[in-house]
Image (tube, grey):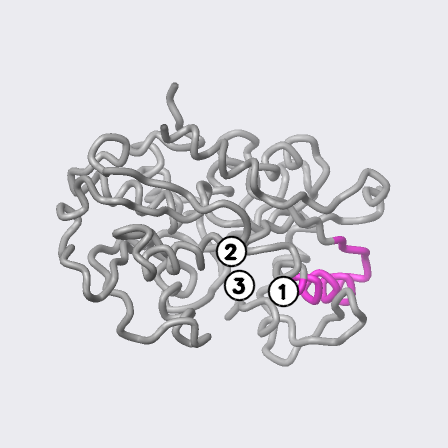
């Protein structure tokens, strides 16, 4: 059942934007994971990509990819760098020895985040054990917080999602994280998996009221979004990129696809980039191994 939902999530993702003609040898390509939808993601990272071009005097090109596409594109050397969640990083590190560059800071946990299990505030479910035989909705199947952390959290609390939940699902299409919140709020599901800051952000955006949800469990903290490179990429270039990103200031600007100059960090929803160590990701590896999820899946 678990594998079927991975396949289902693949079918309904939007199509990635890249072509062979854009792969000029003098162009440095950064693959960005599409989080909610293509328009939102390109709006966030076009200014950052342009800023790198400005600072380093070389052409950087953004390549927007769905999570299920990233491994193939990375393997085939059609991108040089990748900005994605920590699940994607451990997969690329395990299978292709990707080079870790930097972590990204954003929200409550800074460079780390966590998965949470939410219910409506008026729900009679108080603990994880109360989810037995209930309807549960996860976030995207390659989501660090919305799937991996919470899938493991359920198992660590004695519930096997494949056996003990009455039913579980992953929303189709774009904005899966928001759909989890709406699915729980409108009682389509009894509980759902979210990122630590999902509810707070939704309240800030006036999609929900502060008292609409209750958190019944939280996972351990794990690394948030991560920048990595193919193992073949020159260490000198990696150092240059790293130094530029570590030096980003709140008033630094870049140009988006419409020619508008925008604040790089604010537009990208980024608080900054930080040094990270591969060992920081061991906790996520342990979760993936316990849950038998990629890159440690078993058939």
Observer able to see residue 280 = no
Percent position of residue 8, x then y: 49, 35
Q: Which mark is residue 175?
A: 2
**Callout in the foreground (1, 2):** 2
SS under mark 1:
helix
Left or right of 138 on screen, residue 130: left
> Label 3 belongs to which residue?
273
Left or right of 159 on screen, residue 24: right
SS under mark 3:
strand
Left or right of 28 on screen, residue 88: left
Specify which label sits upstream in the sequence, 1 or 3: 1
> Label 1 belongs to which residue?
44
- Please state the extent of the stretch shown in magenta in the rendering: 43-61
SS under mark 2:
loop
Query: At 60% from the left edge and 39% from the top edge, which residue is drawn?
Result: 70
Query: At 51% from the left edge and 42% from the top edge, which residue is drawn?
Result: 88
Residue 163: image quadrant is top left
Question: In what quadrant of the picture does the C terminus appear?
Answer: top left
């Amino acid at each position: 059942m678990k594998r079927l939902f991975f396949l289902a999530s693949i079918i309904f993702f939007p199509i990635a934007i890249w072509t062979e003609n854009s792969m000029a040898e003098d162009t440095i390509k950064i693959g960005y994971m599409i989080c909610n939808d293509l328009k939102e993601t390109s709006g966030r990272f076009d200014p950052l990509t342009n800023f790198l071009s400005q600072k380093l005097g070389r052409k950087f090109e953004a390549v927007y990819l769905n999570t299920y596409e990233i491994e193939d594109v990375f393997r085939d050397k059609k991108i040089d760098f990748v900005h994605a969640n920590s699940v994607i990083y451990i997969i690329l590190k395990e299978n292709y020895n990707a080079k870790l560059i930097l972590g990204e800071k954003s929200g409550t946990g800074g460079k780390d985040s966590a998965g949470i299990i939410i219910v409506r505030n008026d729900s009679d479910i108080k603990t994880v054990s109360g989810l037995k035989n209930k309807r549960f909705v996860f976030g995207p199947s390659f989501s660090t917080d919305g799937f991996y952390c919470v899938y493991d959290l359920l198992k660590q609390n004695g519930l096997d999602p494949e056996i003990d939940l009455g039913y579980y699902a992953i929303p189709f299409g774009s904005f899966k994280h928001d759909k989890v919140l709406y699915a729980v709020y409108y009682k389509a599901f009894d509980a759902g998996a979210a990122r630590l800051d999902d509810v707070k952000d939704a309240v800030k955006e006036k999609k929900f009221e502060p008292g609409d949800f209750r958190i019944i469990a939280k996972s351990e903290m794990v690394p948030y979004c991560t920048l990595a490179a193919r193992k073949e990429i020159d260490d000198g270039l990696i150092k240059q990129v790293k130094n530029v990103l570590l030096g980003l200031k709140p008033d630094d600007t870049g140009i988006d696809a419409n020619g508008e100059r925008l604040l790089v960090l604010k537009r990208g929803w980024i608080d900054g980039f930080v040094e990270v160590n591969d060992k920081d990701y061991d906790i996520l590896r342990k979760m993936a191994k316990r849950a038998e999820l990629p890159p440690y899946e078993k058939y």
